[in-house]
């Protein structure tokens, strides 16, 4: 069996794991990260896109609020291009208690979250679709963050600093000697090859799946997967983040992300982080809540529904079940102290906005156990080139237009028109990942995430990938069918009006014009989570 | 001959074909449509019945379809006469359709699967998969809507890819099939392109020693005069050339649309594109309609008979609502559908989806009826993709249903008005 060695081994390629790996490699550890799927394959890629100002937690969870505002400021500096500086507002709709705004303002002040109440017309003149009966409006420094961009930036930075990132590698067991984890047994899911990676310290950042890793060390760790369902609306109904000014509840945030806006979320404890179907009532509930913010919300096109699982830590293990009550702040679990097994630390809880701080706390503890003192420098060191600007809506269009202004000929056609992904980006994505999985390309480029949900671009990207990766046509057809099947999941709950029209168009392309249903056996299409190709 | 005013809602295949039939019978016909219908998106072929389950049919097997299928409401000559008539119009207007009801043609798709159909434009038939000789397929460098490397080798025919030069400098923006077709319509540009292609073919011959006998191109061979474009390209390349339908917009479909539209207008029909139509049914069971234009004005349309050719979900004839109900968009006629939305679709994207069979229920005269078989209005008929009971994609039956139900509806309208 092949053997490798690394000082720090991080499990999980989401926001937490990538931040932890970045922290470790910047402190000079030889670092390796394992992810069983793709970057942001789990919860990070199913997030609503809100970079918290902390406002949401000032009343219910002040500790989290303080963490959020500090990290909000830091992330704007270290991953600027993943963030759109949208600002955020807390608004009192006719359904909310107007007095709560005073409690909220006082709490913001106490926790150091900048908040300013302005005349309602300031917001209502800017956001014309909002409920005109909104009575109070408070501005906070919320922002929108694209988690695919963020994780890709971090991964790129980590690799540039010499760390290794292994995607589609699953942990199958821990090597424990003398009460200490000294290695991790790994399976490459694409080749089925198994091997051992020796290591001094394992950082378990597998989020909602953390309990599985802890169990391999003989520990029992109760992580309650809290399902959060979100709906992407077809357009940016708002250009700023809009929160209901009330205690955090379901369906009270609307976030503009890229070309869409996302309403979220529900919060339901579920048994398994791998199986959590979206229920009809959730969709109906979210759309109804949207009506309070934007009258006529239901008439706008709801593009796609999806759910993610929050890794909520339950220290009482089975006591409380309301998952919104479980803390959103994070904790480092030392399995030495807890289960008598050294060399393994688990990060539980937390949220996307505080990923860097979580990593810092985790690696601080790792340093302590490894008996070395190395300062954390992640907050001061940007992951992107100096001068990188924040994302703005017309950025892709601008880049594309500029690149074409220099040529008289059009040589870089747009492959995904909805998300403005040109052929050069598709090729770069495939070149870098060498992945036959079109869904990986989606996470790299946003291909297929717009209104047509892959209708046109899937065939085009498939044709390009087939040539670049020397796929057989049969293999390529399976790839194509898998991608369409993955896109299908998020559409099935929302089949009315435009979405059903869109489905007719897309079905006409793939089943009538192309005859894809006559070349692949649908039973062969293996689905999420591994997205493994034959 | 009858006289009277007929309003047709929808300008897809069934609407235009019905318009032609009615105008030939001297009715005063107006077609009002929001857009141009499914021809723009399809293959440009006439599919009557291609599949039973996943199996390809050698011959349409209408008897095997469910009892409530639209085909079973028709007289035994409707389909045959409709097909003959369409073939006659296409031939006369310079874009002949080849094929017949005795045997399905088998033509390649852009993924290299074999697709059964009844009629295909002459520009497609050299690709017949009943011919076992090899296929050469053109890869147009820089064109994003056609990837011959995705055509597989499950076919008995060997497939070879030939790179043809396509100079991207022709375009100031992304090229669609229609852009290439318009270039080929232009005599001078066509000459330039075919010369460049000829050179590519000669190079290929020199390199491989293979003589190209038949060459497949994406369906781009001109919108205006496809026969001339096809002949010129074949002369230049010294081989048979055939078109393979690819991503929309559909050049062969647009040709068919243009041709039917011209025929309809020549017969004196009126075509109004853009407005939507809203109708109501009086207590005396008579339907009446108004057009709603973009500037929100409403204009009454005088009509003795109204034919709904307004399409299925894809073209707004049927509308699915957020509450799980389905409505017919013009008269709010009763629609056959399943109330449980979970039952509308299959788990697998590529399987047959039950919602495809939703639509209007009609009697044998093609007049909408409710679930208790009660006639909804004396002067309303329906045809085409709005009709319930057919899964057009899974059966490969879209155009056959459109033509034959339009034929039958107009036959009944003429009878009712005379």
Image (cartoon, coloured by chain):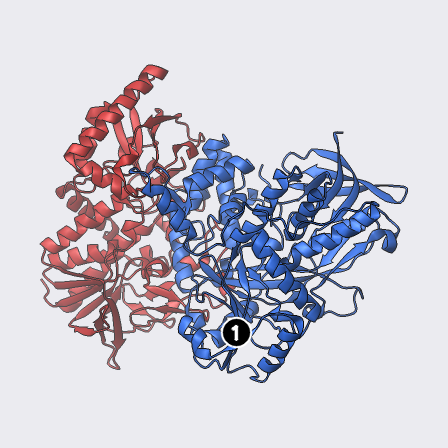
Q: Nearer the viewer, residue A278 or B174?
A: B174
Residue A486 is left or right of residue A15, and the answer is left
Q: Is residue B100 in view from this perspective?
A: no
Q: Nearer the viewer, residue B379 or A30?
A: A30
- Residue B197: image quadrant is top left
Q: Nearer the viewer, residue A363 or B213?
A: A363
For disc 1, the marked residue is A289
Image position, residue B209 (x, y; %): 34, 14
Q: Nearer the viewer, residue A442 or A302?
A: A442
Tell me: residue B378, above or below residue B348: below
Residue B331 is left or right of residue A372, and the answer is left
Q: Colour of chain B?
A: red
Image position, residue B317 (x, y; %): 32, 63
- Residue A516: image quadrant is top left
Task: Name the residue at the right extreme.
Answer: A178
Q: Name the chain letter of the residue that bears numbered label 1.
A: A
Tell me: residue B111, above or below residue A121: above
Which residue is depicted at the point 82% across and 53% down? A334
Image position, residue B140 (x, y; %): 33, 32
Which residue is depicted at the point 54% across and 53% down? A80
Mark 1 nearby-residue class (10 Å; few <14, some 14–19, many ≥20): many
Residue B210 is left or right of residue A483, and the answer is left
The chain letter corresponding to blue is A
Residue A534 is left or right of residue B401, and the answer is right
Image position, residue A338 (x, y; %): 86, 55
Q: Is residue A30 in view from this perspective?
A: yes
Which residue is depicted at the point 27% across and 34% down? B125
């Amino acid at each position: 069996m092949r053997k490798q060695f690394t000082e720090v081994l991080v499990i999980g390629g989401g926001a937490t794991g990538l931040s932890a790996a970045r922290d470790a490699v910047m402190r000079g550890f030889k670092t390796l990260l394992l992810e069983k799927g793709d970057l942001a394959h789990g919860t990070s890629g199913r997030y609503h896109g809100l970079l918290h100002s902390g406002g949401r937690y000032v009343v219910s969870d002040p500790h989290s609020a303080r963490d959020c505002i500090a990290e909000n400021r830091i992330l704007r500096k270290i991953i600027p291009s993943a963030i759109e500086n949208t600002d955020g507002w807390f608004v009192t709709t006719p359904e909310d208690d107007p007095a709560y705004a005073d409690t909220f303002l006082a709490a913001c002040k106490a926790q150091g979250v900048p908040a300013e109440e302005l005349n309602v017309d300031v917001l209502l003149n800017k956001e014309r679709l909002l409920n005109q009966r909104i009575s109070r409006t408070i501005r906070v420094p919320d922002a929108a963050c694209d988690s695919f961009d963020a994780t890709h930036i971090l991964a790129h930075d980590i690799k540039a600093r010499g760390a290794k990132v292994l995607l589609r590698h699953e942990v199958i067991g821990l090597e424990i000697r003398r009460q200490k984890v000294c290695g991790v047994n790994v399976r490459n899911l694409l080749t089925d090859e198994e091997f051992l990676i020796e290591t001094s310290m394992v950082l378990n950042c597998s989020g909602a799946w953390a309990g599985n890793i802890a169990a391999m060390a003989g520990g029992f760790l109760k992580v309650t997967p809290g399902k959060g369902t979100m709906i992407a609306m077809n357009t940016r109904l708002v250009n700023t983040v809009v929160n209901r000014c009330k205690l955090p509840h379901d369906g009270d945030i609307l976030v503009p992300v890229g070309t869409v806006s996302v309403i979220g979320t529900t919060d339901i404890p579920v048994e398994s982080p791998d199986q959590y179907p979206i229920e009809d009532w959730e969709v109906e509930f979210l759309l109804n809540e949207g009506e309070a913010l934007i009258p006529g919300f239901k008439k706008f096109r709801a593009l796609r529904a999806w759910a993610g699982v929050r890794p909520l830590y339950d220290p009482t293990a089975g006591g409380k079940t309301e998952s919104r009550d479980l803390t959103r702040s994070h904790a480092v679990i030392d399995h030495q102290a807890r289960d008598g097994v050294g060399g393994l630390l688990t990060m539980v809880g937390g949220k996307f906005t505080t990923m860097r701080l979580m990593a810092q706390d985790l690696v601080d503890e790792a340093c302590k156990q490894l008996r070395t003192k190395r300062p954390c420098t992640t907050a001061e060191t940007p992951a992107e080139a100096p001068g990188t600007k924040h994302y703005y809506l017309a950025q892709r269009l601008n880049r594309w237009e500029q690149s074409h202004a220099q040529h008289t000929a059009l040589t870089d056609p747009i492959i995904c028109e909805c998300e403005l992904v040109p052929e050069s980006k598709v090729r770069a994505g495939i070149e870098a990942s060498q992945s036959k999985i079109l869904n990986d390309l989606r996470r790299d480029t946003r291909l297929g995430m717009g209104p047509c949900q892959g209708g046109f671009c899937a065939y085009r990207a498939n044709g390009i990938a087939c040539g670049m990766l020397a796929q057989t046509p049969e293999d390529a057809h399976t790839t194509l069918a898998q991608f369409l099947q993955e896109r299908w999941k998020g559409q099935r709950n929302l089949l009315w009006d435009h979405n059903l029209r869109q489905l007719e168009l897309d079905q006409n392309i793939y089943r009538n014009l192309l005859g894809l249903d006559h070349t692949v056996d649908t039973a062969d299409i293996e689905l999420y989570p591994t997205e493994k190709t034959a | 001959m009858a006289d009277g005013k007929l309003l047709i809602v929808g300008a897809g295949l069934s609407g235009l074909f019905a318009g032609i039939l009615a105008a030939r019978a001297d009715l005063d016909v107006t077609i009002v449509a929001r857009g141009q219908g499914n021809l723009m998106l399809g293959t440009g072929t006439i599919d009557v019945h291609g599949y039973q389950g996943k199996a390809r049919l050698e011959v349409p097997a209408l008897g095997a379809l469910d009892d409530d299928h639209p085909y079973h409401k028709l007289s035994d000559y409707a389909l045959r006469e409709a097909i003959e008539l369409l073939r006659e119009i296409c031939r006369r207007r310079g874009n002949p359709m080849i094929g017949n009801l005795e045997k399905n043609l088998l033509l390649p798709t852009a993924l290299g699967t074999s697709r059964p159909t009844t009629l295909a434009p002459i520009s497609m038939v050299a690709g017949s998969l009943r011919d076992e000789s090899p296929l050469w397929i053109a890869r147009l460098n820089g064109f994003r809507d056609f990837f011959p490397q995705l055509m597989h080798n499950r076919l008995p025919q060997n497939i070879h890819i030939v790179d043809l030069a396509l100079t991207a400098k022709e375009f100031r923006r992304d090229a669609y099939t229609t852009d290439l077709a318009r270039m080929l319509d232009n005599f001078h540009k066509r000459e330039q392109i075919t010369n460049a292609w000829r050179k590519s073919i000669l190079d290929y011959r020199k390199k491989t020693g293979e003589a190209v006998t038949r060459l497949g191109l994406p369906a781009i061979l001109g919108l205006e005069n496809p026969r001339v474009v096809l002949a010129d390209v074949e002369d230049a390349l010294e081989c048979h050339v055939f078109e393979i339908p690819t991503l929309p917009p559909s050049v062969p479909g647009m040709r068919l649309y243009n041709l039917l539209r011209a025929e309809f207008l020549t017969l004196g029909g009126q075509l109004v594109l853009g407005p939507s139509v809203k109708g109501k049914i009086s207590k005396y069971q008579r339907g009446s309609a108004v057009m709603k234009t973009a500037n929100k004005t409403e204009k009454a349309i005088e009509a003795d008979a109204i034919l709904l050719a307004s399409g299925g979900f894809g073209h707004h004839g049927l509308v699915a609502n957020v509450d799980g109900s389905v409505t017919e968009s013009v008269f709010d006629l009763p629609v056959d559908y399943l109330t449980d939305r979970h039952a509308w679709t299959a788990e697998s994207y590529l399987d047959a989806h039950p919602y495809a069979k939703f639509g209007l229920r009609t009697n044998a005269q093609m007049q909408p009826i409710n679930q208790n078989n009660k006639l909804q209005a004396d002067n309303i008929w329906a045809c085409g993709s709005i009709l319930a009971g057919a899964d057009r994609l899974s059966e490969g039956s879209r155009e056959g249903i459109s033509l034959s139900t339009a034929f039958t509806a107009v036959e009944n309208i003429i009878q009712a008005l005379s």
